[in-house]
Image: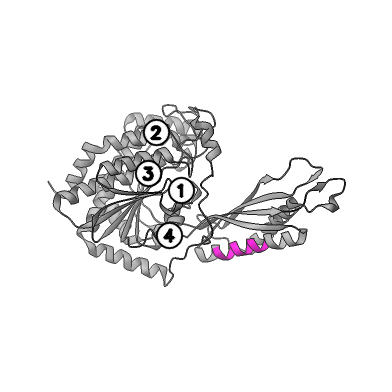
Amino acid sequence: MDDKKKLYKWIDENEGELFEISDYLWEHPELSMQEYEASDKLTAYLEKNGFNVTRNVAGMPTAFIAQWGEGKPVLGFSSEYDALPGLSQDKDATEHCPVTPLAPGHGCGHNLIATGGILAATALKELMKDKGMKGTIKIFGTPAEELCIGKPFMAREGLFEGVDAFLDWHPSHLNRAAAGDTNAYFNVKFHFKGLSSHGNAPWNGRSSLDAAMLTGHAIEMLREHIKPGSESSPSTINYAFPDVGNSFPNVVPATTILWCVARMKDAEMLADVLERVTDCAEGCARATGTTVTREVITATHDFIPNLRINQLLEENLREVGAPKYTEEDQKAARAIQKTMGVKETGYTGEILETVVGSQPVTDSSEYSWFAPVAFLNVAIAPSEDSGWHAWTSAKFAGSAVGKEALEVVGKTLASTAYDLLTHPEIIGEAQAELKERLDGKTYESLIPAESKPDLDTNRDIMDKFRK
């Protein structure tokens, strides 16, 4: 039996425990930065299987690094486990049917991402141990991917340095090696402070809301002077006013928050736009006699694509094959497409050719500045228009098709990692491509040194639903 078949055999015989963990995470979804049960489940599995686990990394209690082996190459695997708000869904239903109304749900399939890389890494570890192969496996447990918090703070601490290649994946409506770039992204809050007064004598006050609204208008003016990007990767700025210091119109508000997120072509453009938006806020504060402070929640770089390593990933995906969608899977997929009012295609099972394109924002982009990233997509949804970040994708992530995808992910990532171990020249070729694409740029964190991860975000929501 050749080594790749040994990997497949180990996965076939041992995947059940990780399937159970995936189901548990799906049944107990936790929002970004509150993934305590998920982190505990995953680290317990890794320690039981011989990995050395470090918890609470980069100041985040739910972040971890698991390591096994020694020497080069160092191969990194990724694990994400946060859910989305309001997407609770009965996994057997083909229409919107929350298990608990308004509760979180895994509408992006992170219960699967949590376990897919671990399945591949553990299978690889067992083969390396059996054959006495040298090399180091690292598994990065990264919280709050939906808010792009985990990986940027881990990168700022230098935790991705020394890795030779990363292997990552995400559920999709496609089966492919995704050699795509992404926009860079920032998530910032501006806290305006004024002076409260009675509405009968507003001249005695200084309105923080005026300052925030004026900043919003300044951002609208700024849009015209920002390069637009492309249809697949547009440059966008969004803002909202999540908290104004009072709810009475006859009281001049003393505090207001303007929350702003933006997606830009690359890190250089993002840094420039962030400073220009900050100038808007500071100028509007001065104009209204108020003050403002900036809170950088997170910021990510653009994803540096790598064709060479993803061509290798495609070869292994074709060898493993797309998920074996059953007739039950097809029936459920078509039923959901009918509910959504879109064409009832079911799953095609097609594997796409690897090309350099674009993909949605993800904080996995931080990996790509340190080493080549092999990024796999496996279809759990039948089509793009069947819904994502929605009850539909939550249903797919908790159903049998999610486990069928996990098996493909485990085998594809494990066999790709095996090729990198046994053919280190491929790593060299991929790293040379990365160096060429970076064109002299080096990683510099976009998060100020004084910024800390927001550990309390979503705590009030999770406290409610845990009870």
Q: CA distance from mark 3 to mark 4?
A: 23 Å
* Percent x, y of residue 333: 41, 33
Q: Amino acid at mark 4?
A: Glu
Q: Which mark is residue 145?
A: 1
Foreground pick, 203 / 443 = 203
- Looking at the image, is mark 4 or mark 1 nearer the viewer? 4
Q: CA distance from mark 1 to mark 3?
A: 11 Å
Pointer 3: what residue?
A: 113
**Residue 224 in view here:** no
Pointer 2: what residue?
A: 398
Pointer 4: what residue?
A: 157
Q: Confirm or deny contact between disc 1 and disc 3 (CB under 8 A).
A: yes
* Percent x, y of residue 55: 37, 48
Please say whether residue 21 is one of the residues in the magenta stretch.
no
Q: Confirm or deny contact between disc 4 and disc 1 (CB under 8 A).
A: no
* Percent x, y of residue 401: 35, 35
Q: Amino acid at mark 1?
A: Glu
Foreground pick, 211 / 221 = 211
Furthest-bottom residue in view?
Answer: 440
Q: Confirm or deny contact between disc 1 and disc 2 (CB under 8 A).
A: no
Please say whether residue 272 is one of the residues in the magenta stretch.
yes
Circle 4 SS class: loop
Q: Confirm or deny contact between disc 2 and disc 3 (CB under 8 A).
A: no
- Dot 3: few (<14), some (14–19), or many (≥20) neighbours within 10 Å? many
Tell me which numbered mark, 2 or 3, is placed earlier along the sequence. 3
Provide the residue span drawn in magenta: 271-280
Furthest-right residue in view?
Answer: 200
